[in-house]
């Protein structure tokens, strides 16, 4: 008889030792049993699901296995087939009687999914395809890691009901300090999708580079696109390439948030067009690390013609709701100019049908539209003006995305002996620190609804290759993903998380991710 052990995700620890423990009929008292002779590993999941009940038995892939996924579920079915066919060695055709079932139907957790596995079938259901996609990410982690030498694939029986705590679960990639091409961005999209992140914020312009073709402003990419930190060649996306990224992200249910940082962080634009400068003289390209020295000319009308061209073209290419105007570290702009500028640009953005988003400094602007999103980058203990800026933002009807630099900035060094990384935000940033915070407790007087979610920014002053990106992001981004997804659990423990992470490490390895073997984790 099936042994039901009903408890929350945290309690699941007791059954599966939270890691990849091989469970058989006789090994551990009170543990669900597989059919005699079977050893099927019960695998843990990151981010931790809301509820999981482990059952007897397992589903074993064989030549009769087939996928049933019709209508809205078909696309996710094709995606799953692509993963499973390679891994299990089975043909996995589509047919209506298939025993690997994906269904879109009402009645499931909002933005979540239900996943049920027993000896006769795997069943994932959700209200929409996005939910199914999230369920498929869970199934991937329940499967044995890809191994070319074995095609004897089984997955332990379980029942999972799961949904996210926050609707915005983001990663940010700075393609301005160093440029990363379309293939790198797609690879990062696939990697963050495994962790149920659903936003990729692209930092598309800064002092060191301008990364998107803007019609009517060719020098932005000819001049501004041809530089990066260290003086390398830089690069840029054509509008067609940007659209390719947006479409690829959409196929992984990930929203692209485009950021063009202004009025500071604009040297690449100022070096491309003399007329954007107050003195009508183009600046020189900048290849260093410094911040806070550049500003668009706030009291010049041409500035707003330029910004409207950028915003309108980007808005037309971007289906997601946000345009991120940056707004951080504008030390070369007077406060009066800054407020005037941000209010004007916010209006251009809403006129283009998008919601303004910006680093939390934009809280200074007195007329922010309702729904404006502030991205919080100060520490988990706010300093200076930060708390007031957040208050003003929320008073204006805004929402917060939490990316406190001392815990969520995955460009910070893991330890002082590392060669890659910056080290200004209370360095070093260990995995434990990335995991040990809660977004709402940074501003405890505001309700949970004020918080859209979390983001893990990856600035790339010191990050030059895809391998560097992976090394800095993984595994710390898994901690941020869990904070964004998993139900608030005050007794959440780092000790339990690292055991699950050790299992996840096997998947990172099989996906070829160059992750940092942080010393806190008992990597297998
Ligand atoms: C701060 S905090 C920045 C970026 C740098 C980063 C390096 C914030 C919004 N901006 O300009 O790249 O530090 O860690």
Image (cartoon, rainbow, N blue to C red):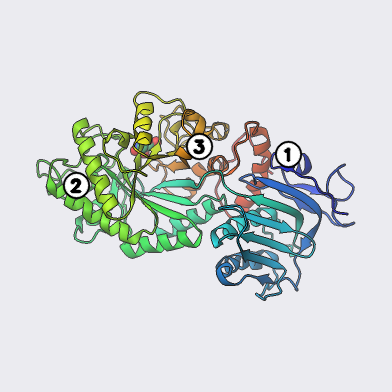
> Residue 96: image x %, image y %?
67, 75
- Residue 223 in view in this figure: no
> Residue 19: image x %, image y %?
72, 44
User: In the figure, is residue 422 to the left or right of 53?
Assistant: left
Q: Quadrant of the N terminus?
A: bottom right
Instruction: Indicate the secondary structure of the residue bearing disc 1.
Output: loop
> Residue 304: image x %, image y %?
18, 49
> Can you tell which of label 3 and label 2 is closer to the viewer?
3
Residue of label 2: 271
- Determine the residue positioned at 11% across, 41% down: 278
> Residue 325: image x %, image y %?
30, 45
Instruction: Indicate the secondary structure of the residue bearing disc 2.
Output: helix
In this rendered view, identify the residue nearer to me: 313 or 112: 112
Please report whichever mark, 3 or 1, sits nearer to the chain's N-terminal start.
1
Structural distance between the alpha carbons of marks 3 and 1:
25 Å
- Residue 150 in view in this figure: yes
Q: Are marks 3 and 2 in contact (CB under 8 Å)?
A: no
- Determine the residue positioned at 20% across, 38% down: 340
Q: Quadrant of the C terminus?
A: top right
User: What label sits on residue 448 in the rendered view?
Assistant: 3
User: What label sits on residue 11 in the rendered view?
Assistant: 1
> Can you tell which of label 3 and label 1 is closer to the viewer?
3
Write down which quadrant ligand 1 falls in: top left
- Does 67 sit above or below residue 518? below
């Amino acid at each position: 008889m099936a042994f039901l052990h009903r408890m929350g995700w945290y309690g699941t620890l007791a059954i599966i030792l939270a890691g990849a423990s091989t469970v058989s009929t006789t090994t551990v008292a009170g543990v669900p049993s597989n059919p005699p002779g079977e050893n099927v590993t019960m695998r843990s999941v990151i981010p931790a699901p809301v509820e999981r009940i482990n059952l007897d038995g397992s589903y074993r892939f064989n030549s009769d296995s087939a996928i049933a996924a019709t209508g809205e579920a078909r696309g996710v079915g094709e995606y799953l087939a692509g993963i499973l066919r390679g891994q299990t060695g089975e043909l996995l055709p589509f047919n209506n009687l298939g025993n690997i079932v994906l269904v879109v139907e009402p009645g499931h957790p909002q933005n979540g999914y239900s996943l049920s596995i027993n000896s006769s079938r795997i069943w994932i259901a959700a209200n929409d395809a996005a939910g199914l996609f999230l369920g498929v990410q869970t199934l991937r982690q329940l499967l044995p890691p890809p191994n070319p030498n074995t095609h004897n694939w089984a997955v332990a029986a379980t029942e999972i009901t799961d949904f996210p705590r926050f609707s915005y679960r983001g990663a940010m990639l700075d393609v301005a300090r160093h440029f990363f091409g379309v293939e790198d961005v797609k690879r990062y999209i696939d990697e963050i999708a495994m962790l149920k992140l659903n936003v990729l914020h692209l930092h598309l312009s800064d002092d060191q580079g301008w990364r998107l073709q803007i019609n009517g402003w060719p020098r932005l990419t000819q001049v501004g696109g041809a530089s990066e930190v260290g003086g390398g060649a830089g690069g840029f996306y054509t509008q067609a390439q940007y659209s390719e990224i947006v479409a690829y992200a959409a196929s992984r249910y990930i929203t692209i948030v485009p950021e063009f940082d202004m009025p500071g962080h604009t040297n690449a634009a100022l070096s491309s067009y003399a007329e954007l400068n107050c003195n009508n003289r183009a600046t020189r390209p900048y290849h260093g690390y410094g911040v806070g020295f550049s500003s668009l000319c706030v009291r010049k009308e041409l500035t707003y013609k330029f910004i409207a061209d950028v915003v309108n073209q980007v808005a037309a290419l971007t289906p997601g709701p946000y345009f991120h105007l940056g707004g951080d570290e504008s030390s070369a702009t007077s406060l009066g100019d800054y407020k005037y500028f941000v209010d004007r640009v916010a209006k251009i953005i809403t006129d283009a049908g998008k919601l303004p988003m910006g680093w939390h400094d934009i809280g200074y602007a007195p007329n922010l539209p309702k729904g404006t999103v502030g991205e919080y980058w100060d520490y988990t203990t706010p300093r200076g003006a930060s708390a007031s800026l957040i208050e003003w933002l929320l008073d204006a009807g805004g929402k917060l995305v939490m990316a406190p630099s001392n815990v969520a900035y995955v460009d910070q060094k893991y330890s002082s002996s590392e060669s890659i990384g910056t080290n200004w935000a209370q360095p070093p940033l260990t995995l434990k620190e990335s995991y040990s915070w809660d977004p709402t407790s940074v501003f405890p007087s505001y309700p949970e609804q004020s918080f859209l979610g979390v983001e893990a920014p990856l600035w790339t002053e010191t990050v030059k290759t895809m391998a560097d990106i992976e090394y800095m992001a993984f595994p710390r981004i898994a901690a941020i993903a869990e904070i964004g997804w998993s139900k608030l659990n005050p007794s959440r423990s780092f000790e339990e998380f690292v055991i699950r992470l050790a299992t996840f490490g096997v998947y990172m390895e099989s996906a070829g991710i160059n992750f940092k073997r942080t010393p806190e984790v008992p990597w297998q």
